[in-house]
Amino acid sequence: MNEKYDADVAIVGYGPSGVIAALTLAKHGISAVAFERDRDIYQRARAVTVNDWTMRIFQNLGVDEAVKKDMDPQRALRWQTYDGVELLRIDHPPSTLGIKPRFFNIYQPTMEAKLRECAARYDRLLDVRYGSEMVALEQDDAGVTVTAKDTATGETSSTRVRYVLGCDGGSSPTRGQLGVELLGDTIDVMWIVIDCRVKRWWPDRNLLTFWSDKKRPVVDISLSQGNHRWELPLQPGESEAAFATNEQVWPLLNALGVTEDDVEIHQHAFYRHHTRMADTWRVGRTFLVGDAAHLMPPWAGAGMQTGMRDAYDIGWKLAGVIKGELDESFLDTYEAERRPNAAMYTNLAVELGRIIKQELSEEEQADLATPPEGPENPPEPPLIAPPFLVAGWLRGPIDESSIVGRMVPQPEVGDTRGVIARLDDLLGDGFVLLGDDVDPASLLSPQEKAAWDALGARYIAVRPQDKHTQGPDELVDLDEVLGPWLRRFGARAVAVRPDKFVAAADVSGLGVPA
C-alpha cells in the first residue's frame, strides 16, 4: 500500500531558520508546508549580524545578492571601558570563503522579509500557512500527522508528511509535543534593547563596541538601513515598568552621551539571557532546529546564524534521503555535527560575556592585552575562524593538522570553456572529489569509486592557471588558493560534501565515510 502525503516535510515556525529550511528543501525539489502562528514578521530587531559562512549558505540558495542589498559591511569589534581602555579588538581580515566583506550588519525584519520573498518563488513546492498554529503531532513508522489550528477561526486541519522540522523558537511547541527537555540556565538579569533611527553620524559609529563595565555593560552596534541599537542590563531596583515610554528610556542613552541630535528612539524591548540546549534534537521523524534546540547569550552574534546553519544542514540531508540518494541513517549525522558547533558558539558567547561584564581575573585581562607569541600567522580567533566540523559524516583524524572537517576555501576558478566564477557556482550541489593537478578518481580503488559513484559524485582535477586543462570536468585555480591549501595539509585530493566541508582526504583514506 502506497502512503499518501500532503507534502514531504512540515516546517513549524517560519522565522529565519524555518525559511532557510524551506529554501533548502525547495531548491532540491522537496515539497514543504510551513505553519506560522503570526501573520506578520516580528518587527523587533533581534539578530544584528551575519558572517561569511552564513552568506555562503545564502549564495548556495541563490539569495545572497538579494539580501546583501539591505546589509552594511561591519568594520571591526572592540571591547572598551568607559575611560577609553581597549581590552580587545578583532579586525576582519579577508575571508577564505569567497565572501566580501567578511561580516555584515543587518536589520533582521528587513532580511527576513527578503528571504520570504525569495522563498515565494517556489510556490509550487512551498505552502506557507500564516496564522496557523501547530497543536499536535502524531508520528508512526511511515510519517507524521500534523494538526494545526487557524488562529483567527479556531478551525483545525490535518496534514500528512514524511518528516517535521521544529523551527518554532525558544518556547517551541514542537519540543513540548515531543517531551524533550531544555537543559541549562537563565540568568536572572533583565536587559533592555533600544532600537533607534540615526539622525547624524558620530565618531566610529560603525565599530561594534562592547562597553565593558561591572555595573552597566553596554552593547553599542550599528544596524543596517540607518538603524542603531544599544543593549543595557537593568540594575537592582529597576523594572520594566520604569521604562515604559521613550521619555523614560532617554536617560539611559543620555548617560552614554547619546542625545536627540544623534537618534530618535524607534522601539525598545526587554529580554533575559539563556544558556540552554535540548537533551536531544531528534525524536523519530521530527527534528528540532535553531532556538528550539539551543539558546545562547548574544555576545557571539551567533544565535540566529546557528539556527539557519542547522536548517541548511538538515535540509540538504533530508532532501537526499527523500529522493533516495542517501540512506535514512544519514539523518543521524544532523545532531552529531550541529550540536558541537552550537555548544562551541554558546561557550564562546559566555566567555565574551565575561569580558563585557568585567568578570575576568587580572591575569586573564593581562593575557588579552598581550600579543600572541608563536608563528607569524597565528590561528584566527574562534569568533572569526573558518568553520569546521568535529564529528559526523567524516573519515580520518580531526585535529589542527588535518584537512578533514574543514570548509574548503572558495576562490574564483575557471572551467575548461573559460567561464570564471566562484568555486561553489561551478561545483554544484552534490558530492565532489577535488584533486590537486590530478584526477582524484585515479587515486581511488574500484570499490571506493563505486561507492562515490553511488552518491553521484563528480571528479574534478584542479589545474594551476599556467597549465592546460586536459579533460571536460576540470577547473583552473585562478587565485592559486586551492592547490596551496591542499598541500598545506599534505593532501593531493579531498572529498567535499554538498555543504562544502571536507569529508575525507587521500592522506587518511578517500573512501566514503562509514
Image: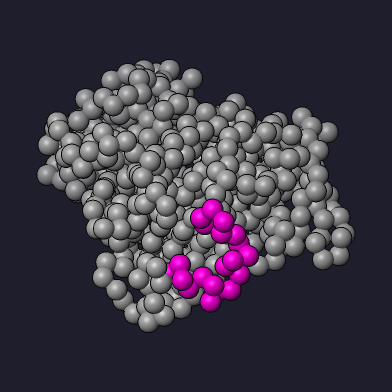
Quadrant showing the N terminus: top right
Question: Residue at 35% across / 71% down in the picture?
Answer: 257
Rendered position, 389 above or below 217:
above
Q: Nearer the viewer, residue 119 or 257?
A: 257
State the predominant SS element of the stretch in magenta. helix
Location of residue 135 in the rendering, given as x and y in whole percent from the top left corner? 80, 48
Location of residue 502 in the rendering, given as x and y in whole percent from the top left corner? 37, 32
Location of residue 5 in the rendering, given as x and y in whole percent from the top left corner? 77, 45
Location of residue 273 in the rendering, given as x and y in whole percent from the top left corner? 53, 47
Residue 72: name its quadrant.
bottom left
Magenta segment range?
A: 234-253
**As drawn, is 479 to the left or to the right of 40?**
left
Q: Nearer the viewer, residue 492 or 344?
A: 344
Question: Residue at 31% across / 76% down in the picture?
Answer: 201
Question: Residue at 32% across / 36% down in the picture?
Answer: 361
**As drawn, is 199 to the left or to the right of 6?**
left
**As drawn, is 436 to the left or to the right of 255?**
left
